[in-house]
Image (spheres, rainbow, N blue to C red):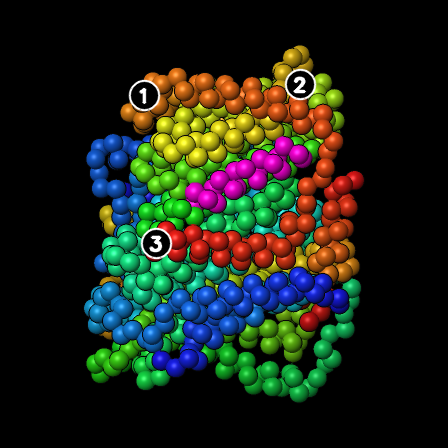
Amino acid sequence: MTVLALLPLFHFALAPVSLLQGRLARRLSALAVLVDAALVGWLLASIAGGGDLGIVMGEAAVGLGIRLVADPLTIGFTLLTLLIEGALVAYLWSEAPRAYFYTLLHLLFGAVFSTLFTRDLFNIFVTLELLTLVSFLLVGYERKARQVWASLKYLVLASLGMSLYLIGVALIYYHTGTLDLDAIAAGLPPGPVPRWVWLGSALLLSGIAVKSGVFLFSIWLPEAHARAHSAVSALLSGLVIKMGVVVLIGLAATFPVSVSLQVLGAVTGILGLVYAITTDDLKRMLAYSTLSQLGYVILGVGIGTAASLTAAGSYAVAHGLFKGLLFLAAGTAIREGGFRDIAPLIAQRGRVSRGVRLALLVGTLGIVGLPPLAGFAAKSLLTHATAALPVQGVMFLMSLGTAAAFAKLGRLLWPGKGAWGSATANLSFIVLGLPVLFFLPLAWPVLPRALAAAGRSPIPYAESLAAIVGGYLLHRWIRRRPRRALPQRFLRLEEGVMTILSGFFLVLILVWLQAR
Amino acid sequence: MRRFSMPFAVWATLFVTLFCGLVLFAFDYEGPRVDSLGLSSESLAYDTGAANLVSAIYLNIRLYDTLLEVLVFSVAVLGVHFYLGPRGVEEQVEGIPESHVIRTSAGLLLPVIVVLGIHLVLFGHVSPGGGFSGGVVAASGLLLCAVALGAEAVGRRFHETFLERIEWGILLSILCLACAPLALGRLPLTDVLPQGQVGSLVSSGSIVLYNVLIGLKVFIGTWVIIHFFMRHRGEI
Amino acid sequence: MGVLNGVTVAIILFGIGLLGLILRRDLVIKLLALGLINSSTILCLVSLNARPDGAPPLLQGNGLGAMVDPLPHALVLSAIVINFAILALALVFVMLLVERYHTTDSRRIEEEVAREEGE
């Protein structure tokens, strides 16, 4: 299983090489995709061959060393990373940014691979900080003032979150003497939970929630994802934000945070959609939609059963695919059409190439959950995994809202006539779009039982079609009503800190209620 | 500068006080615990060959964390270079005036600082120190030079692009050193050099190599960051 | 342990840093407050198992005294470097913003950016 350590190390090694050999950077990145594919193939082969699933870096007793583990959920995210890497390399091929950009990309992918496999509290801290810094530099890449401001807010809030997390780590280490997640789970005292457990869980959860797109904690997300260069937005919304979710899955297995995750997930999902429906800027709508879809995923993680965890993980992977596709296509559409807002873009849709519009169509169909695409498959897994009626109701509302938000794109989605656009951009759309279209056959070898069980009943089909139609009708109804601007004040830095604190209190109360 | 409105300030103070109170209340801190370490200190020292147990931990057992943190440092240098590099000087600021006192005292202090930096780096596995502290001490020595001689003069001696190339080369060497155990069939980032006798200079395997490489890297990186800040402002 | 120990002081400093981050509008002061918050977490880690009579975690060759736990010290090394990197990069961005808008007031920068984006 040394490949678990090789994947990040390979990318970290490519970073200085890309910088020192600037002219080769683009070709090196293509080479990196091939080598990654080979390494991931090796990883899959080792797991299929029944090999040991983890290694300990440091060869010391567990508790002092750092454990790296690969489980089925992680494999899904690894494949997502590979696909997004390939799509990004193809998308940037004609644009050819500076070697600095490729260096940052390699560092980012290395950090992503490190976060995926780690099961150690402090290692999570260091990898997430590396991820934060590299994303921060990527958002500010074009040096425009609004990007610089958005990324500065991101850095300050993320650093604050990680400081909360670090105090939680200190607390947990003090009381349990170890930093390894499984050792901590074994070491937590049974029976009534002492005070430090709920404080520690609340601190850790609050810290990671800042980076996971939970509504109260991640107010930096709409601006940072919307204002960045589109390839960067695709990367952040499609991949980086999922790393927070991966860590949340690890935390949820050890600490009593499931109720908090369910509540936060539901709130995030619904509030994110309210903003997505009422905003006119294309990339901002996609960013708010990311927030709400993450609410979906976090709700699934909070439910906590094995089936719901698998479902939440698959939904996160599916979302990474179609949100990445949407952002890449949106970036090209905005550049070709010349407007950032949706209504003028629809008017100028003749200038947008066919490949882009087709990509937008596939992405939208995926995100609203048309059967049998990726979104539908993952959503039906999730609804099948839970029997509680209020949770199903919330999920249906979210599907409704997503359809209403994306119905705004209207005629922009119809390919129609026109030029096909750049070949490499279309290649990147294909790399992401094909898995969205053919998610079911691709995921079948990995999730046979769950998918078969979910696919047998007609309820998911009926539900998703009802949500799509209902969402479209909702969109028509909203369009006729007078528009009232929603408060944007909460996006400021001071409000951001206050909402993090209030979120912390909320989580504390919920954890206390759960673990009493 | 105007503050915020009263209600907001009151809310903020309330929230923060509540936060501190809750954390203090629930931390359950009962003084130091003497039984936390997973392995005993002796086995830690003799397994890794380092007398300095902290070095044994962060340069041998938890080397993965240290590697990631070195990368964080490199990202910082990369970012500073990208944003402050191409800009010229915003406004020419009057530097610290030429002073005989500063020059003489700098000349007296500099050898001490350099020797201290080298000692911290080389003996980091035996006494407190290590690559990070040694590198920062050496960089502050160079900063002292810049204060005494002027940033321009020092910048001409230590050419920017050359330094950066060396720094990225050092990062590559660290990664190669990390992957070297693969050739022997072990996991990367483990220690495969001979341990030697605990407490002597030649001991603890690759910890010394890591200390030297990290010390050089931190030295160059810190100096580059400081130099870009100085150059951007116009003078020190 | 007495009421005034390292962990308590660290949490109080964290609170002071939070107040500074929220209530002061100058960007540089906000960064200072962030630095204070980061340093307070480091203080918390270091003073977790600190004792007045504890020996430093070095094997002196004459057997073991009552050594302090070396693991938090190793964690702190990484944390310090990460905080340094965050502070350096945040300062660079603050410099960029100040040059563009000629003010360090966060509220005004927010308004200017919103106005530019609306156009």
Asked if marks 3 and 2 touch (Cβ < 8 Å), the reply is no
Range covered by the magenta-colored residues: A261-279
> A458 above or below B1?
above
Pointer 3 or 2: first along the chain: 2
Tell me how far mark 1 sits from mark 2, CA to CA.
35 Å
Rendered-image quadrant of the N terminus of chain C: bottom left
Mark 2: amino acid: Arg
Q: Is residue A457 left or right of residue A97?
A: left
**Vertical relation: B156 (above or below) A276:** below
| Residue type, mark 3 in image | Ala
Mark seen at residue A452: 1
Q: Residue A499's spot in the image, x, y percent?
A: 57, 54
Q: Which residue is mark 3?
A: A515
Q: Are marks 1 and 2 on the same chain?
A: yes
Q: Nearer the viewer, mark 1 or mark 2?
A: 1
Left or right: where A8 falls relative to A429: left
Mark 2, chain letter? A
